[in-house]
Structure formats: C-alpha cells, structure tokens
Image (spheres, rainbow, N blue to C red):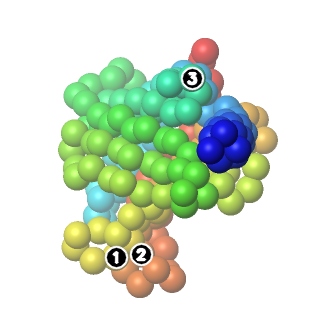
Amino acid sequence: MKRAVMVLALVLVASCAYGAEEMGKLDFLIGEWKGEAWIQMGPNKRETVIQTEKVTPKAGGKVLLVEGLGKRKMEDGTAGEVVHDAIAMISWDNARSTYRFIGHVAQQESVDSSLDMTAPNTLVWGMDTPQGGKVRFTIRLNEKGQWVEAGEFSRDGTTWMKFMEMTLTKSK
C-alpha cells in the first residue's frame, strides 16, 4: 500500500511539474498591453478600436487570466464606447496534453476551446460558429516584441478571410 501511495505521489508531482513547464511557455503574454485594432464586419464596415489586454498569472501560475477591453476610436483619437469586453482563462490540461482556453465576451457567446502553440511565442485558438463555419485567432510576438493578433473566418476550414487584427505594445 505504501508503495502505491508513493508511486501516485510521484506521478502527481511529475504531472504538476510538466503543467508548470507548459504554462511557462506562455510567459511572453504576461503584462499589460496597449494599442489599436481594426475589425471588419461586412463590406465597408471597418472600425478602429483602442485595445488593452492584461494578462496575469493566477493560482500559482497554473492559470493565465486574460482581460481584454476595446473601445471605439473616435475621430479625435480618444476612446469612445466599449465594443469589446472579454475575460479568459488559459490553463494546461494534462489529460489532453493541450492548453485550454475558456473565454467570456460581453458581446458574444462564451468559448471553451483548445489553444495550440504552433511555434515559439505563437498561439492559435478557435471555434466553430453557430451560423456554420470556423473562426480562428493567431497570437504572436513580432520582431519588435509586440503582440500581434489576427482573427479569421472560414466557411469550409480551408479558405480564410481576415476580419480583425490588433497590434499591442507592452506597457507594464
């Protein structure tokens, strides 16, 4: 019995260490980010947004809390009404060997998705849409260390159309 308990304890410790190692790969996101985004919802309906993202490690680093806020950019350059208000949690799922992305957006449905690290400092997550088709978001750090994120839509999962892009600079 003692041996079984010891083996279980070792497995749990190794599992936690592996999860911590995987979460450490996302440290590049931690901080406060500010910049602009554009979003296009239909022909000739492109809108500029002043965007912030705050990424904070929680639960001893097991979870990243991502808080996003976008405000319509007014003609004078100031921030207007809120057009994007979101919060998400990213964690490592040992059972599935993948990151889990759970997001809630005031203006849309909630999302429970996997998130893939496709290259160092590059993440992709997405979902099926209720209307049919798929949406994916690619987050990466560019050569200047900026957070660049693109949102794309596809009806067939093959041909993608960009509907959103943001470029943010770390402020803290």
Question: Does the CB distance between marks 2 and 1 fall below 8 Å?
Answer: yes
> Is 137 displayed left or right of 78 in the figure?
right
Residue with the most extreme front position: 1
What residue sits 34% from the left and 76% below the top?
A: 133
**Residue that label 3 marks:** 60
What residue sits 51% from the left and 33% below the top?
A: 63
Quadrant in which the N terminus appears: top right
Label 1 SS: loop
**Residue that label 2 marks:** 154
Compared with residue 137, is residue 69 higher up or lower down, i.e. above or below? above
Viewer-nearest of discs 1 and 3: 3
Quadrant in which the C terminus appears: top right
**Residue 142 in view of the camera:** yes
What residue sits 41% from the left and 30% below the top?
A: 67
Q: How far apart are marks 3 and 2 (CA)?
A: 37 Å
> Is 43 displayed left or right of 145 in the figure?
left
Most foreground residue, 27 or 47: 27
Compared with residue 70, is residue 47 higher up or lower down, i.e. above or below? below
**Residue 8 in view of the camera:** no
**Residue that label 1 marks:** 133
Compared with residue 85, is residue 156 higher up or lower down, i.e. above or below? below
- Sequence-wise, the earlier of marks 3 and 2 is 3
Q: Please name the amino acid that badge 2 sits on.
A: Ser
- Sequence-wise, the earlier of marks 1 and 3 is 3
